[in-house]
Structures are given as structure tokens and as C-alpha cells.
Amino acid sequence: MSFPESSIFCCFFHLRQNLRKHVSQSNLLNLYNNDPDFALKCKMIIALAFVPENDVINALNILENELDDRFEPLISWFVSTYIGRIRGNGTRANPIFPIPLWNVHTRTILNIHRTNNYSEACNRKIKRALGMSHPSLWLFLHSLKKFLALIDTDIELQVAGREPPRKRAKYMECDDRILRICNNYDFDTILDFLRGISHNFNID
């Protein structure tokens, strides 16, 4: 392994996008857009990402009992991709993305990024600086040097005491609400927990 001390995590933003894609592929997008209760229950499926890892499967079982047949294609996708299907011998198959990879409960409590939007924003800035998708090697290196000089300037300004750009107030308030819900986690009220988390994000 090249970076033995690194940790790899999935991005919650992309989990939300993946849910939207499967809502659309299952011909449920119109229902999602016009039925707030249906939309909330769809989001409760991926709100399982905020449940402590050891409780995720039990929480999913409880949630499944609350969902009607309309949710079957979404549950089927989620289980095969993120949980693992039960085999004929009673053991669980390995999912494409194991629970520790996409679970954000601990990251939320520790105030660690749940998405990789910050790195994607950096990629967009580099692409803008290049002005094209496939530059020559020399143009790429020249643009990268200019980009790194701007980053060095930003770092120096922060060293000098300038505050970094702040998140928008609405996102900070949303993060505070999600943190409060995670800090008050109680498995006995798991459906309330999932509903509470789901009120605080969209998949649009």
C-alpha cells in the first residue's frame, strides 16, 4: 500500500446523487417530487449512513418494516450495494461498498468532512485555470505553478491571521442540527432519528 496511514471514505454527497439516480431509474421521481412523505422515506434509506456502524443492519430491518412495496427497488439496490444480500446459506455477501466505507456517524461527531466537495472544488479551480480539458504537458505544468502560487498566498494570509472563507449560514445551521441529532442518538427511537436526519438534506 502506498499510503499505509491514509483512510479511504465514500462521499455522502455522491450517496445522495446515487439515491436520486435510482429513484429516477425506478420511475419514482414524479412521486418523489410530489409526495413529501414518500420523499422523506426515500431519504431515510440513506440516512442510515448516520447510524453507528454496528446498528446499521438492525436499523435497516426496522426501516424496511415501515416501507411499502413502492420502496422495494430502492431497498434492493441499497442492500446489494451497501449492505450485502443474504445468501442461501444464511451468510451475508460482501457489498460493493462495506458499511465502514460510507458510514458518516463518527465523522459527523468528530466534525470531519462527510463529502469530498472541497477536493472537487479544487479540481474545478485547476480546470478553470487551465481553460481546457486536455492541455499539453508544458501548459499543464505552467498553469499548475500559477495555481500553487495562489494557494501559497492563501496559506500565508491565513498564517497572518486572516480567517478562511466561512460556510454559508444555512449550511452551518444544517450541520449543527445534524450534529445535535447524532449526539442524541438512541437506537430505541431509530425511526425518529432517521426522519430527523432526512429533514436536513436533499438529493436534488
Image (tube, rainbow, N blue to C red):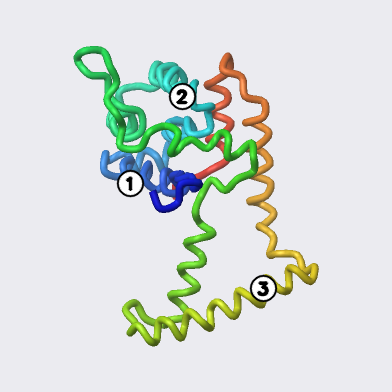
Say left or right for 61 vs 156: left
Residue at numbered disc 2: 56
Residue 202: give x, y in percent of width and height.
Answer: 50, 45
Residue drawn at point x = 51 percent, y = 82 percent: 145
Label placed on residue 37: none
Q: Disc 2 versus disc 1: distance between alpha carbons?
A: 22 Å
Q: Disc 2 versus disc 3: distance between alpha carbons?
A: 41 Å
Residue drawn at point x = 60 percent, y = 78 percent: 150
Residue drawn at point x = 63 percent, y = 75 percent: 152
Label placed on residue 154: 3
Circles 2 and 3, Cβ within 8 Å, touching? The answer is no
Amino acid on which the number 2 mark rests in the picture: Val
Q: Secondary structure at mark 1?
A: helix
Circles 3 and 1, Cβ within 8 Å, touching? The answer is no
Residue 97: give x, y in percent of width and height.
Answer: 35, 37
Q: Disc 3 versus disc 1: distance between alpha carbons?
A: 37 Å
Residue 159: give x, y in percent of width and height.
Answer: 75, 68
Amino acid on which the number 3 mark rests in the picture: Asp
Q: Quadrant of residue 32?
A: top left
